[in-house]
Amino acid sequence: MPWLSWHACELVNYRLKPAITFLHCVFLCLSVTTLSGSSAKMGSISAQPRTMRSCSADGCQECPPSAVATTRPYLRTALARSVYSKILVDEEFKNFDRTKWYKVNVEALEPEADELFLELDSADAETQVFLERCQERSDAVFTQLFHLVARTLLAPFVSQTSINGILRRGSMFVISDRQFRKLFHLADDYRAERMLDLGAGDGATTALLAGMFDNVHVTEMSWPMKRILAARGFTIEDVEGWSQRPDGYDVICALNLLDRCSRPLTLLEQMKTALKPNGLVLVALAWPFRPYVEFSATGDHQPEQVLDIDGQSFEEQAVSMMRNVLKPLGFRVVSWSRLPYLCEGDLERTFYHLNDMIFALKLD
Ligand SMILES: C[S@@+](CC[C@H](N)C(=O)[O-])C[C@H]1O[C@@H](n2cnc3c(N)ncnc32)[C@H](O)[C@@H]1O
């Protein structure tokens, strides 16, 4: 009976698309009254991805609303509590000022960094499309429950990235093609021959940029992600051999990879050799900078090479990345910015977000 109720709610939700909050309420009522036995176990299972967390700092004005409710009704089941907390966060997010995702404290910047900073448009259409898809997917309660159980069963054997690939969940959003062109000051009809996206994940962001290129190449470590990338029609390059291509790339992206790979400095050097003359490089890095190598040979998840990034604040770390890492390696910053790094949610959140520093680069 409880499973039937879940399924019924989900079907109504998907087929008729009536007011989502109303359906959540129906679902809550059903789960509060009928699911106490079966879902009580959910409380012990973490549904939160390892790398994507909402900021929980008290009174933080920059993050979307947290799910911490000061008062809430007594809900008997963990599942009901999750769904209720998601409804609260979604409601608060409607009033959240999204420009905060894109702003930095310019007063904390040195003049050079201030000059190169470019604030992106918070009303980006692709970002909105992604958020709407997150809503749709996280509201599919039955699927989310399946993911929750499957993730728990797979976790001892497979990396988090590969689990997401197997379950086709946890897609990420970094940048749209419009935002890409804006950062490099390119015309709306910009086109080039070949792009390479290093550590492309499931290729969700790659696909948004792919329309500007005749050929799209990617690298990945995770085999389920490679399968998704191949199905999207991207050419998969070897993680060791990609930089030896004789004809080079017009654009190379390394989005949220430098803190996830073991040898980020070698990777940046290889990007220089694989780039065509006048080629463009796009680097995104999550703040705060916390390296974690999922596929480490030693198993300690620590990188062999550490990027010299100091400071605590977003601005300090971004400036330090430009001054201590990119400049000494011979990269010139065309512009840099701040973006929300978005990830599809689950039963607890419609989406998760981190802050990305993003650098549009050319070679000196
Ligand atoms: C945090 S995800 C970023 C995915 C995507 N670029 C994005 O920004 O949403 C990092 C990805 O890099 C992959 N990865 C890690 N080390 C790599 C390496 N040395 N070469 C290629 N991919 C790697 C991981 O499997 C993972 O999918």
Image (cartoon, rainbow, N blue to C red):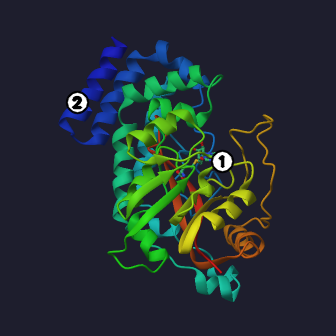
Mark pair 2, 1: CA separation? 49 Å
Q: Residue at x 62, y 45 (%)?
A: 51
Q: Residue at x 55, y 59 (%)?
A: 63
* Whether residue 55 can be seen here: yes
**What amino acid type should be assigned to the residue bearing mark 1?**
Glu
Q: In the picture, which quadrant includes the N terminus?
A: top left
* Whether residue 121 can be seen here: no
In the rendered image, residue 243, in percent from the top left (x then y), is placed at 62, 57
**What amino acid type should be assigned to the residue bearing mark 2?**
Val
Q: In the picture, which quadrant includes the C terminus?
A: bottom right
Residue occupied by mark 2: 12
Q: Residue at x 43, y 69 (%)?
A: 179
313 lies above or below 234: below
Residue occupied by mark 1: 240
| Along the line of sight, the residue nearer the viewer: 283 or 313 | 283
Q: Nearer the viewer, mark 2 or mark 1?
A: 1
343 lies above or below 331: above
Q: Secondary structure at mark 2?
A: helix
In the rendered image, residue 141, in percent from the top left (x then y), is placed at 38, 29
Label of residue 323 in the image? none
| Along the line of sight, the residue nearer the viewer: 11 or 268 | 268
In the rendered image, residue 189, in percent from the top left (x then y), is placed at 32, 75
